[in-house]
Amino acid sequence: MANLEVDFCGVRIKNPLLAASAEPTLNANNMKKCIDTGVGGVVAKTMTDSPAMRELTTRAKWRFLNEQHEVCHGRLPRGFSLYSRSGLAIEEPKDFIKEIKKTVKYAAQNDAVVVGSIGSVEEDGWVSLAKQMEDTGVPLIELNFGCPHPKLMEGVRTGMNVGQDFDYACEITQAVAEAVSVPIMIKVTPQVTDLVHFSGRLLESGAKAVTLTNRFIGFVPDINTGKPVIYGQAGIGGPWIKPLTLRWINEVHATYKGKVFISGTNGAYDWRDIVQFIMSGAHTIQMCAAVMWHGYKWMGKQVKKLEQFMDEKGYQTIDEMRGIASDAALKYSEMPAEVAKVVPELCNNCKRCLNVCFADAMQTGKENTWIKSENCIGCGGCYSICPVEGAIEINPI
């Protein structure tokens, strides 16, 4: 049986799946429900000293959107979007600390970990919140440099506004790292030019891990009303965004392999996605949107299916999978020359491949399509559109 344990910043976690910092981890009761599913741990809703960020959560709104970016209304497509406006933990720090302590105690009884999350409006506040969080007994603290998305008040930098200012973010990171003894991880916004460079600077400033990544800001009009969905701009993520998230995990893993721990978030819907996150270089995977639709038990099911997959493929540990796809990645200039081949006995001569061949390689005959090899560049368009599995092969030259 596969061993799902991971070492994350020196902290043992029984499996790589964590409940992300969001409504499912809003308080001790919610976090208990997450832990009961068998996940490795929870990232608590972000504790803050900002009344504005706390009040925002009391008016939180979210919608699940389909491929046309319309409200799903009961049917959730695989590539859905979660479009939402929310804030941080509702309780003041002195009260939310009690929620964290309850959860830490319960997690210890169930072989799970609690990651504390904090967000402030000034450097001293970040340090103060980190010290308070450390005193609860959490083994890790995440600094939320990605959420909330809006600028709540003039002259105040929070969430994403901090994550877009590399110098300020690194100042906060260094101050917190020097003030606490537990490892700190930084949740970053994807709305910057270079997360590889930023991750390196965060490591130099004292961070042990990065959480890649928070959500983008989106804007969705309702064409029937002429008004924006949930009143305006909002954070947007979900399974559709996974390749964008994995791109950054791939690059950070490749650049700082062995030097940084990566917690992947934004895009993980099920066990298949968890595997892809791991193969891209993530140590842990945080899940949110799928839980908000399917409920808490969804996470437990994905842990079991991850274990089944590993057993079927012969993976003994998570480490055997971590980063293998990133390590095998080639540069554009390194791609091999390939050519397509039609398997005549399988081709039904539907001619769909003719529409996607722009090299004039696909040719049509009376019984089946064939390939003018000297024209073929092996792009794979025909392979993708062919409705008969195995009818077209892509082979090295």
Image: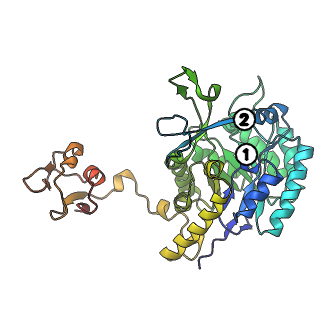
Whether 390 is drawn above or below 359: the answer is below
Q: Which residue is mark 1?
A: 23
Are the residues at dot 1 and dot 2 in contact (C-beta closer than 8 Å)? Answer: yes
Q: Which part of the image, by quadrant, shows the N terminus? A: bottom right
- Crowding around mark 1 (Cα neighbors within 10 Å: few <14, some 14 to 19, many 20+) is many
Tell me the number on the disc at residue 60.
Answer: 2
Image point (89%, 43%), residue name: 93
- Place of residue 90 in the rendered image (x, y in percent of width and height, measured from the top left): 82, 40
User: Callout 2, which amino acid?
Assistant: Ala
User: Callout 1, which amino acid?
Assistant: Glu
- Place of residue 14 in the rendered image (x, y in percent of width and height, measured from the top left): 70, 69
Viewer-nearest residue: 169 or 28: 28
Q: Is residue 358 visible?
A: no
| Horizontal arrangement in the rendering, residue 344 relative to residue 179 (left or right) | left
Circle 1 sits in a helix, a strand or a loop, which is it?
A: helix
Q: Which residue appears farthest toward the top when viewing the image?
A: 226
Quadrant of the rendered image containing residue 256? bottom right
Tell me the number on the disc at residue 227.
Answer: none
Q: Which residue appears farthest toward the bottom when viewing the image?
A: 1
Name which of mark 1 and mark 2 comes first in the sequence.
1
Q: Which part of the image, by quadrant, shows the C terminus? A: bottom left
Circle 2 sits in a helix, a strand or a loop, which is it?
A: loop
